[in-house]
Image (spheres, grey):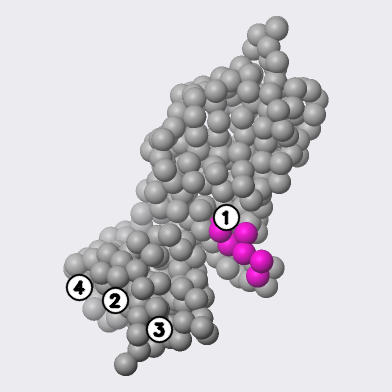
Amino acid sequence: MSMSVALVADLVRRDGTSLLDSTDEVDAVVEACSTTLRPHRLQMKHRDGRLSARLHSLTSGAVALSRLNYGADVTISEIRPQQDEFILALPVAGHARFRYGSSTAVVSPGSMAVVGPYDGFTLEITREFDQVLVRLDRTRVESAAAFLAGSGELGPVHFDLAAGKVSPALTGLVQAALQVSADPAVERRPRLTFQLERLIIEATLLGCRNNLSAAMAGPSERISSDRVARAQDFMVANLADQFSLTAVARHCSVSLRSLQLGFRRELDMSPGEWLRNQRLDLAHAQLVIAVESETTVTAVATACGFVHLGDFAARFKDRFGSSPSAVLRAPRS
């Protein structure tokens, strides 16, 4: 199982609200899961089967995260075809067979599925199947897809049901959203939760094949060195913010693909790698001069645009040979 998914699952259970705890009443399980995820029917696969459902739920901005295990072999199906959300299923243990429209996929740890809002679905779930579910607003997904595809009109986004391997980038963003939601100051930082939601949606759109994938890739025209420099200036000016590379490309009036190729040609690295290095260098410079009694590694990391603190610490040590906390504690001359 992907350690990223395992960590996400643990965080949802630790920080989320427990809505079901070994619950065996079908009506109670259906009500809780329908409210948290989407309306559906539940059927026991075996006449003598007994539910032992556990459901934890946590919301970060407009992104809703759940961990769900039915504890029995069940079949889940839609009440109505048209829904208001996309559901990303990230398996933690066991396996299940998903059917959506005319597509079928067997999902298990390491893989993921995207259940859209447009067609009927049937989920055949085993008692061992444990999963993290990410619910994304349909309108926000369609709006982001239209922008990425260069379209002025919203339209359906049809993902392949079998979305392939779980993307570390996607699960890293989900982890960041969970950590931000647990921050006592989160209510004072609505912009950050919105930015993370947008990044999760774009990571899903760009990382999971769908009917707009080709349009989202965009043309790969050669861009000038000036455009690369303009992108660098934009990123440096906004290091503390959470923004997508799509926003950088839009600022420079180029496609995302062209931006990536331009950075690779000029700097032999991707825009994301360049941005991360700038943030790491800024964090290192601040920690070198910081007074330990007056700040924390978390405060510096957040001020430099990092929200996934574990990833920040690992990459910082890789780049500078010392941990952020060691640099902060080092004697000042």
Q: Foreground mark, 1 or 3?
A: 3
First-in-chain label (1 vs 3): 1
Cα separation, mark 3 vs mark 2, equals 26 Å
The residue at which mark 3 appears reads as 286
Q: Is residue 159 above or below residue 288?
A: above
Q: Which residues are magenta?
A: 177-185
Residue in the picture at 35% in, 61% down: 314
Cα separation, mark 1 vs mark 2, equals 33 Å
First-in-chain label (1 vs 2): 1
Q: Quadrant of residue 31?
A: top right
Residue 275 inside the magenta-drawn segment? no
The image position of residue 207, as x and y in percent, is 40, 48
Instruction: Bin the neighbour count of mark 1 within 10 Å (Cα to Cα): few under 14, some 14-19, many 20 and up.
Output: many
Q: Foreground mark, 4 or 3?
A: 3
Instruction: Bin the neighbour count of mark 2 within 10 Å (Cα to Cα): few under 14, some 14-19, many 20 and up.
Output: many
Residue in the picture at 64% in, 12% down: 45
State how many labels appear.
4
Asked if labels 2 and 3 touch by Cβ distance under 8 angstroms, the answer is no
Q: Left or right: 102 with respect to 270?
A: right
Cα separation, mark 4 vs mark 3, equals 28 Å
Mark 4: secondary structure: helix
Give the amino acid at mark 3. Gln
Q: Left or right: 17 with respect to 224?
A: right
Which disc, if any, is residue 266? Answer: 4
Cα separation, mark 4 vs mark 2, equals 8 Å
